[in-house]
Image (cartoon, helix red, strand yellow):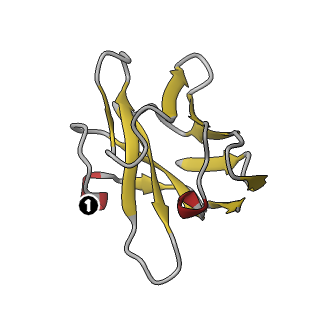
Amino acid sequence: QVQLVESGGGLVQAGGSLRLSCAASGRTFNVMGWFRQAPGNEREFVGAMTWSGRITNYADSVKGRFTISRDNAKNTVYLQMNSLKPEDTAVYYCAAAAGFLGSSPQTYNYWGQGTQVTVSS
């Protein structure tokens, strides 16, 4: 049974940092990444990384502030979020794909349950 379990969300002041973790079990994936969804908005791509780590892609809104990394030995992907802004407030979802790295939710086969990130001004 495949599971993605996120952790690390919480409340932080603007300008602060948080690190999210997503541990996968049941199989390995070529691509692991993150999406987020704020109330009333569609789920949006944050960033993703391939198994090798050689290919990463980020949304323009987080480039230079967020960094994805993965520990393949632990089958875990991380999202380091720095210089957080109130507009980063959302539920963050870990996602995994067997195929290519894409920015559409339809590209991803498995999802975590989500973790809330709230950035206060």
The quadrant of the image that shows the C terminus is bottom right
Examine the image and state in which quarter residue 113 appears: bottom right
> Which percent across, then down, holds residue 71?
57, 20
In percent of the image, x 60 and y 63: which residue is there? Answer: 89
Circle 1 Cα neighbour tier, 10 Å, few/some/many (<14 / 14–19 / ≥20): few
> Which percent across, then down, holds residue 55?
28, 23
> Which percent across, then down, holds residue 86?
61, 61
Q: Amino acid at mark 1?
A: Gln
Disc 1 on helix, strand or loop?
helix
Left or right: where does residue 54 sit relative to residue 24?
left
Determine whether 16 is above or below 64 in the image.
below
Determine whether 58 is above or below 2 in the image.
above
Judging by the rendered image, the residue that carries numbered circle 1 is 106
> Which percent across, then down, holds residue 44?
37, 61
Left or right: where does residue 61 sit relative to residue 14?
left
Left or right: where does residue 34 sit relative to residue 18?
left
